[in-house]
């Protein structure tokens, strides 16, 4: 017989507290996040492996020589965008790990419930 994969249960207060923290996090993310439709996303140029290296180098140079930026780029907006890119990248990594573990737990609980 298979061993139980997961054994845990929330009380109502614990579950409510977690849902509230998720709602609070969502409210914070809503302050800056946007919704881009898939069709639009395909048309937007974004950072990939090669363009990220170029952009990082351009940012490093621009921090020391702001006059090197083309006229249509403002240093302040470049800084905001580049920092937001890096910060959201870090958030995504943290959330993906948490979500992956949550999905695994969800899967295991379903398997345990089915075989009980």
Image: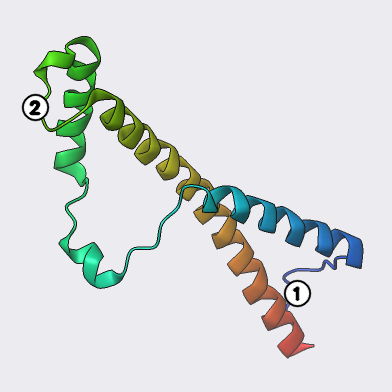
Residue 3 x, y percent position in the rendering: 75, 74
Question: How many other residues sit within 10 Å of disc 2, few (<14), some (14-19) or many (≥20)?
Answer: few
Question: How many other residues sit within 10 Å of disc 1, few (<14), some (14-19) or many (≥20)?
Answer: few
Residue name at image x 62 percent, y 75 percent: 107
Front-lying residue, 14 or 63: 63
Kind of element beneath mark 1: loop
Q: Earlier in the sequence, mark 2 or mark 1?
A: 1
Residue located farthest toward the top when viewing the structure as drawn? 64
| Colour scheme shown | rainbow
Residue 11 visible in the displayed image = no
> In this figure, what is the number of numbered marks?
2
Front-lying residue, 110 or 99: 99
Residue 95 x, y percent position in the rendering: 54, 52
Residue name at image x 35 percent, y 40 percent: 85
Q: Where, quadrant-wise, is the N terminus in this rendering?
A: bottom right
How far apart are the two marked residues, 2 and 1, measured between alpha carbons? 63 Å
Residue 96 visible in the displayed image = yes
Residue name at image x 75 percent, y 68 percent: 6
Quadrant of the rendered image containing residue 51: top left
Q: Which residue is mark 2?
A: 70
Q: Which residue is mark 1?
A: 3
Say which of marks 2 and 1 sits in front. Answer: 2
Position of residue 23 in the picture relative to residue 70 (left or right): right
Position of residue 37 in the picture relative to residue 87 (left or right): left
Front-lying residue, 23 or 12: 23
Q: Where, quadrant-wise, is the C terminus in this rendering?
A: bottom right
Kind of element beneath mark 2: loop
Residue name at image x 43 percent, y 43 percent: 88
Residue 50's tag is none
Position of residue 31 in the picture relative to residue 23 (left or right): left
Q: Classify 27 as above or below 67.
A: below
Quadrant of the rendered image containing residue 103: bottom right
């Amino acid at each position: 017989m298979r061993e139980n994969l997961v054994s845990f249960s929330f009380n109502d207060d614990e579950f409510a507290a977690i849902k509230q923290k998720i709602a609070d996090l969502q409210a914070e993310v809503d302050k800056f996040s946007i919704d881009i439709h898939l069709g639009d996303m395909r048309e937007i140029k974004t950072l990939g492996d090669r363009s990220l290296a170029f952009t990082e180098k351009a940012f490093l140079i621009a921090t020391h020589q702001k006059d090197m930026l083309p006229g249509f780029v403002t240093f302040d907006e470049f800084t905001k965008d580049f920092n937001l890119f890096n910060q959201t990248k870090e958030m995504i990594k943290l959330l993906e790990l948490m979500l992956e573990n949550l999905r695994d737990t969800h899967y295991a609980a379903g398997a345990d419930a089915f075989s009980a």
